[in-house]
Image (cartoon, rainbow, N blue to C red):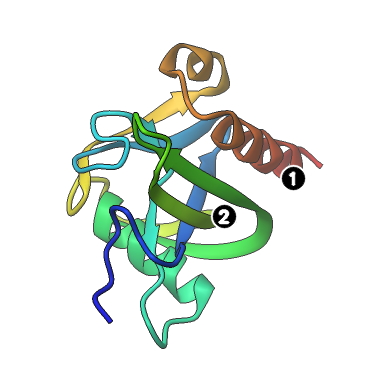
Amino acid sequence: MVIRREFPEVPFVGIGAIIIDGDRVLLIKRAKPPQQAQWSIPGGALEVGELVREAAVREAREETGLIVEPGELLGVYDRVLRDAEHRVQYHYVLIDFLCRCVGGTLAAADDAAEVRWFTRAELPALQLAEDTLEVIGKGFEKLRR
């Protein structure tokens, strides 16, 4: 079976790392489709044989240069993007974890064109997906308690 991300036959599992430091969250600007040139949570596809928390650590390191420790599961989200003819172009099941930075050096790499810290006040101007804003908000709330 040929596995395609674009116009897939089965959904992909995507793992996200919500990395928060004080009143800031770390986002990456995607270098490749889907959502190329848009700000997003660091993350990517789960690999065969990889545990979901291991994927959060790997993806954070690959895209941001940071070493993270994944903690609480913040949510599971559907991301279905359709083309002009309403065919499913991309289908991801996203699993997002609150992560704590424990090392590394911040640098955009792999699928990230840029990496940057944003305050909560800056987020609305980025036009993030609604579920992205929701899960980031959950991360801030968990840390506030």
Residue 74: mark in rendering: none
Question: Picture coordinates of residue 73 (x, y %)?
Answer: 67, 60
Which quarter of the figure is the N terminus placed in? bottom left
Q: Residue at x 53, y 42 (%)?
A: 20
Residue wearing tag 1:
142
User: With 97 as the anchor, is 128 left or right in this view?
Assistant: left
Question: Picture coordinates of residue 93 (x, y %)?
Answer: 53, 57
Residue 10: quarter of image:
bottom left
Residue 87: quarter of image:
top left
Question: Mark 2–mark 1 contact, CB under 8 Å?
Answer: no
Mark 2 surroundings within 10 Å by alpha-carbon count, few (fewer than 14), some (14 through 19), many (20 or more):
many
53 over 16 or under it: above or below: below
Residue 96: mark in rendering: 2
Q: Earlier in the sequence, mark 2 or mark 1?
A: 2
Q: Nearer the viewer, mark 2 or mark 1?
A: 2
Q: Nearer the viewer, residue 28 or 38?
A: 38
Question: Amino acid under label 2?
Answer: Asp
Q: Residue at x 36, y 33 (%)?
A: 85
Q: Which residue reaches farthest bottom? A: 49
Question: Amino acid under label 1?
Answer: Lys
Question: Picture coordinates of residue 120 (x, y %)?
Answer: 56, 22
133 over 64 or under it: above or below: above
91 over 25 or under it: above or below: below
